[in-house]
Image (cartoon, rainbow, N blue to C red):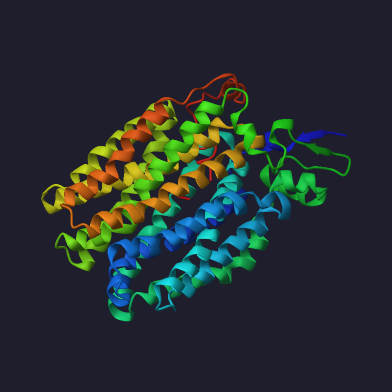
């Protein structure tokens, strides 16, 4: 009889079709998530015109989804402990797809806000579960690459929203880009059938036959028998870790700094996602050109996520992140200055790389910092706290827009949080608990992967 450590099997497995399947579904889900999140900012100028709302009220309308995301990240992000990760992901997809589409059928600001709040529950809840899924099954030596590739789907979803928005809004109205969001519901049965369940959940619920099948697919050379017994390290077992565990073993101050960084970064991300189209349109660019800036922003995000992850594998992620936050402060500030069109596109791309891309790497850092047993809790709570920054961003920037301030002052307001986030990340401490959880051969800097871990 053998005792098989399934955590070790996943860590040491060679990449195969099974890993490719997990990557495909997780990345596709993140693309849907990114589309549903970006679509409000894409359509914002048209919504404001048709519903007759001012910038301040429009900011509250956009924030309704982000408010839902805060609750979704905290509560739906941990529901997998009770019902399994596949069903948790399926519920979240149904929520954000159905209610985003429902928002496209409304003509009243209050109903629009209500449906977007419900959609936000799913958007926020799916992120921790999908990131945990990819992190669990990715081989250790490829974890950085796989998690970052998966997370880049968020920016791909934003680009998809911008591309569809350019054609659909002019031809069929802003409602069309919302209604199109219902399509992922049709894929839920395939996701339930194809996506593997979490191994800790299977172990906890005694579903050993399913676990054997997954282990055989993870590592085809390992053929479990009836006599074999499965186990996981104590620190890796599934369970709902209380929030107080985030403040134990010397993690308290660093946990607070992660919360500050998440808050500030998500403020920047959603300020740009919600208002870039409107600000550029107000600066004299056509709607088509303004949407092209959104496309460029998300393309830059992909480059920033992959490039930031690559750098984090080679240098200490703390200083990589600090540098990316400084770049965000500079590039966002430059958005408000007169530049040649080509230079403006470059700066928009850098802003995307250093905000959305940086947020992805910040998730990775949090996932590496916390032990496996409290990783989902650490990421979920940090994401939930960060959502308050996301909620405030559209409201604050909307209020500034309504004051008719110079364009540069709007962008300076978005850039200031980058400086605060850089300071917070620089103050994160790696004490006994941070180093103890990593194998000696794996440096703390090799982190972008361990959990780009769990949106925006």
Quarter of image, res 42: bottom left
Q: Is residue 244 left or right of residue 330?
A: right
The spot of residue 327 in percent (x, y) is: 28, 36
Quarter of image, res 176: bottom left
219 over 439 or under it: above or below = below
- Residue 302 seen by the camera: no
286 over 407 or under it: above or below = below
- Residue 177 seen by the camera: yes
| Image quarter of the N terminus | top right
Residue visible at 49% across and 68% down in the picture: 114
The spot of residue 260 in percent (x, y) is: 44, 36
The spot of residue 132 in percent (x, y) is: 59, 45
Viewer-side residue, 428 vs 222: 428
68 over 263 or under it: above or below = below
Residue visible at 36% across and 49% down in the picture: 269
Query: In the rendered picture of this protein, how many numbered marks are placed on residues?
Result: 0
The spot of residue 373 in percent (x, y) is: 67, 36
Q: Is residue 5 left or right of residue 370?
A: right
Residue visible at 46% across and 49% down in the picture: 387
46 over 374 or under it: above or below = below
Residue visible at 23% across and 42% down in the picture: 331
Viewer-side residue, 267 vs 182: 267
Q: Is residue 40 left or right of residue 117?
A: left
Viewer-side residue, 370 vs 111: 111
């Amino acid at each position: 009889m053998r005792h098989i450590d399934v955590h070790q099997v996943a860590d040491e497995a060679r990449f195969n079709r099974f890993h490719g399947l997990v990557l495909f579904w997780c990345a596709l889900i993140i693309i849907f998530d990114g589309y549903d999140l970006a679509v409000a900012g894409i359509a914002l100028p048209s919504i404001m015109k048709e519903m007759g709302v001012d910038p301040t009220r429009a900011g509250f309308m956009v924030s309704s989804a982000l408010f839902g995301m805060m609750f979704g990240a905290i509560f739906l992000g941990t529901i997998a402990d009770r019902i399994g990760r596949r069903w948790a992901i399926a519920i979240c997809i149904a929520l954000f797809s159905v209610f985003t589409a429902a928002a496209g059928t409304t003509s009243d600001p209050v109903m629009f806000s209500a449906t977007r709040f419900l959609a936000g529950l799913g958007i926020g809840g799916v992120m921790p579960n999908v990131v945990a899924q990819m992190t669990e099954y990715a081989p250790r030596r490829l974890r950085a690459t796989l998690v970052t590739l998966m997370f880049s789907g968020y920016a791909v979803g934003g680009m998809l929203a911008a591309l569809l928005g350019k054609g659909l809004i002019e031809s069929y109205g802003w409602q069309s880009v919302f209604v199109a969001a219902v399509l992922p519901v049709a894929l839920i049965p395939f996701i339930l059938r194809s996506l593997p369940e979490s191994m800790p959940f299977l172990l906890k619920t005694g579903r050993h036959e399913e676990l054997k099948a997954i282990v055989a697919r993870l590592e085809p050379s390992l053929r479990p028998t009836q006599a074999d017994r499965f186990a996981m390290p104590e620190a890796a077992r599934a369970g709902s870790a209380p929030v107080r565990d985030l403040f134990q073993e010397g993690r308290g101050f660093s946990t607070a700094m992660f919360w500050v960084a998440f808050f500030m970064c998500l403020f920047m991300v959603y300020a740009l996602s919600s208002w870039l189209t409107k600000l550029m349109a107000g600066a004299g660019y056509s709607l088509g050109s303004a949407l092209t800036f959104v496309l460029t922003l998300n393309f830059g995000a992909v480059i920033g996520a992959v490039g930031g992850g690559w750098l984090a594998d080679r240098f200490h992620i703390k200083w990589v992140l600090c540098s990316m936050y400084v770049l965000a402060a500079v590039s966002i500030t430059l958005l408000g200055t007169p530049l040649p069109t080509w230079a403006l596109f470059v700066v928009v791309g850098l802003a995307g790389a250093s905000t959305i891309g940086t947020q992805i790497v910040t998730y990775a850092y949090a996932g590496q910092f916390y032990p496996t047993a409290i990783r989902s809790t650490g990421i979920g709570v940090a994401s939930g706290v960060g959502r308050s920054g996301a909620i405030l961003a559209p409201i604050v920037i909307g209020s500034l827009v309504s004051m008719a301030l110079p364009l540069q002052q709007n962008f300076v307001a978005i850039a200031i949080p980058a400086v605060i986030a850089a300071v917070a990340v620089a103050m994160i401490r790696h004490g006994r608990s941070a180093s103890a959880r990593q194998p000696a051969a794996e440096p703390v800097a090799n982190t972008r992967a361990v959990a780009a871990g769990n949106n925006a």
